[in-house]
Image: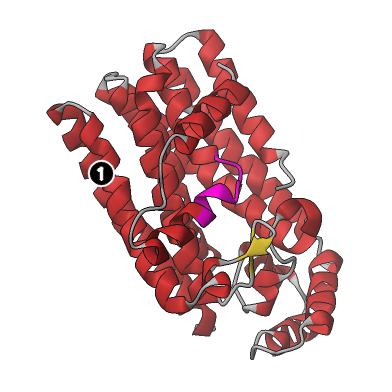
């Protein structure tokens, strides 16, 4: 199991596709977002799972591409909804072109994602499409909850964890399960690898929340403090409300009351509040907790001990990321 090999094979497959066709105004933004780079973690997971369960990971390349195309579709629309200027250190699609182009190109990507399942036999196609439809709708559920939470004043940590499960984790879990489906392993293994991905995805999103405030803009690829600017009630914010004193809570809520044009002071002050209340330590503990939950499913999987260790090593690597 070689992550770099999966990445190389996937990028070769991605680059073999001719994205730009007529009308160019529809397809150029698709080519742009797919060429921006990124971690390619989800397609790598699909290839990894197929390798673990069948040793023939290359047959999972179309499914891996479907996951990557769908993921990038969600990024285009998320960036529009968040009015985000940067994605992976470059201008977002709606900034480079316009909002209408971003919406329509994103829509086309969702349809393109489904087309890649046509590479498989009917029974595999059906299983992939069923899982994909369920996952895509859950991602929309999660996105709507994320939007709702911006104006709600009573969001709980449990509600937040459910929102990121839907918005982020289910896609990580589905990426792994799709590899298992293509490999035609048994349902038990497919369900267990999904559970592994679900918990790893929660840890991954909590890490993303942490990096949004405490990461390095050079390596993170997004604007640091974006969640603070958008008043996103992340785990960092909600945990602060749980552990801080009355005066600090009041100050934090004041900063989250409205969106500003100039956010430098807001980001500095909110970051300082997080630090004073040991939020970096508390979120790190939570990341470790979900990573361990993911690892606990490995013992039940019908795979070699070596592959169990490989999955564990991947999970540990993922939690040490800075991007």
**Nearest to the observer: residue 161 or residue 105:** 105
Residue 194 can be seen in this image = no
Residue that numbered label 1 is attached to: 115
Which residue is drawn at the image coordinates 56% and 29% (left, top)?
7
Q: How many marks?
A: 1
Secondary structure of residue under mark 1: helix
Colour scheme of the picture: secondary structure
Compared with 35, 196 (above or below) is above
Which residue is drawn at the image coordinates 65% and 70% (left, top)?
227
**Nearest to the observer: residue 202 or residue 221:** 221
Compared with 147, 298 (above or below) is above
Within 10 Å of disc 1 (Cα), the crowding (few <14, some 14-19, many 20+) is some
Splitting the image into 4 quarters, where does residue 118 fall?
top left
The image shows residue 14 at horizontal and vertical percentages of 46, 37
**Nearest to the observer: residue 52 or residue 154:** 52
Compared with 22, 117 (above or below) is above
Q: Seen from this angle, which residue lies furthest left?
A: 122
Residue 221 can be seen in this image = yes
Q: Is residue 265 left or right of residue 62?
A: right
The image shows residue 60 at horizontal and vertical percentages of 37, 26
Which residue is drawn at the image coordinates 42% and 72% (left, top)?
101
Q: Which residues are magenta?
A: 32-40
Q: Tell me if residue 35 is in the magenta stretch.
A: yes
Q: Tell me if residue 188 is in the magenta stretch.
A: no
Compared with 200, 27 (above or below) is below
The image shows residue 258 at horizontal and vertical percentages of 64, 91
**Nearest to the observer: residue 271 or residue 62:** 62
Which residue is drawn at the image coordinates 66% and 84% (left, top)?
256
Q: Is residue 323 left or right of residue 36?
A: right
């Amino acid at each position: 199991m070689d992550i770099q090999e999966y990445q190389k094979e996937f990028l070769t497959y991605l680059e073999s596709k001719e994205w730009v066709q007529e009308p160019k105004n529809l397809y150029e933004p698709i080519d742009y977002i797919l060429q921006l780079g990124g971690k390619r973690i989800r397609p790598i997971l699909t290839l990894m799972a197929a390798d673990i369960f069948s040793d023939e990971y290359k047959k999972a390349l179309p499914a891996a591409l479907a996951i990557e195309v769908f993921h990038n579709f969600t990024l285009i629309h998320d960036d529009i909804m968040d009015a985000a200027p940067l994605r992976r250190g470059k201008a977002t699609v709606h900034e480079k072109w316009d909002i209408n182009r971003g919406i329509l190109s994103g829509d086309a990507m969702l349809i393109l994602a489904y087309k890649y399942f046509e590479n498989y036999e009917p029974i595999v196609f059906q299983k992939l499409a069923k899982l994909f439809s369920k996952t895509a709708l859950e991602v929309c559920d999660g996105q709507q909850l994320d939007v709702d939470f911006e104006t709600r004043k009573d969001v709980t940590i449990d509600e937040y964890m459910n929102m990121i499960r839907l918005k982020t984790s289910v896609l990580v879990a589905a990426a792994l399960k799709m590899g298992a489906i293509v490999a035609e392993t048994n349902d038990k293994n497919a369900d267990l690898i999904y559970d592994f991905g679900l918990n790893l995805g929660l840890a991954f999103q909590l890490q993303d929340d942490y990096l949004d405030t405490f990461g390095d803009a050079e390596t993170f690829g997004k604007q640091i403090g974006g969640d603070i600017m958008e008043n996103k009630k992340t785990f960092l914010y909600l945990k602060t409300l749980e552990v801080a004193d009355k005066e600090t809570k009041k100050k934090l809520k004041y900063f989250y009351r409205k969106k500003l044009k100039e956010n430098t002071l807001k980001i500095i002050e909110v970051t300082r509040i997080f630090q004073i209340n040991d939020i970096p330590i508390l979120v790190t503990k939570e990341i470790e907790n979900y990573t361990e939950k993911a690892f606990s499913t490995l013992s039940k999987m019908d795979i070699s001990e070596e592959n169990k260790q490989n999955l564990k090593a991947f999970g540990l690597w993922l939690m040490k990321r800075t991007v």
